[in-house]
Image (cartoon, helix red, strand yellow):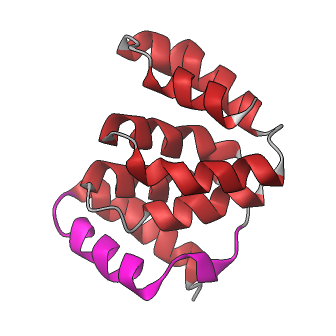
Amino acid sequence: MDVAELDRLLSLEYSDDYWSDEAVVYLRESVEQMSNAEFQGLRSVWRQRPQTWQQRLAEVLSRAPAEGAFILGEMLESSDEETAIAAAESLNSLEAFPSEIVSERARAWLLELAERSPLNKMTVDELMEKIEPR
């Protein structure tokens, strides 16, 4: 799937049920097949898209190859709380990723978000454990 098609599909209106049962599954499988060049293209456009689109992208990248993890690392710094937490949740679902993709700025922001709700705290604690194992 190319970036233009992914962009189009992420922009469509979906019911919550259809998104979680159908669309996200299809898009996760599709991004697994994207090339490095396509990920670079995606990396250059995600910040210009609406917050709902960004949140969906973060969810879709939960099964992406390593190139997708770098986008998720950037998304952790999003000023939109839901986007940052969605990116953290997706990183938590990846088997492995380079811990350096989580910048100091992202760590500070995530720790602030963790104080806002118990669910955020669980997500952030899990991610911090992955990048700073005891």
* Residue beneath the point at 30% across and 49% down: 82
| Secondary structure character of the magenta stretch overall | helix
67 displayed left or right of 106 = right
Above or below, 3 against 70 in this view is above
What is the quadrant of the N terminus in the image?
top right
Does residue 94 sit above or below 3 in this rendering?
below
x and y, in percent, of residue 80 in the image: 26, 54
Residue in view at x 40 percent, y 59 percent? 123
> Residue 15 location, x and y as percent?
37, 10
* Residue 101 screen position, x and y as percent: 59, 76
Q: Nearer the viewer, residue 45 or 126?
A: 45
Region in magenta: 97-117
* Residue 30 location, quadrant: top right
131 sits to left or right of 50:
right
Residue 106 lies within the magenta run:
yes
Relative to 56, 78 lies left or right: left
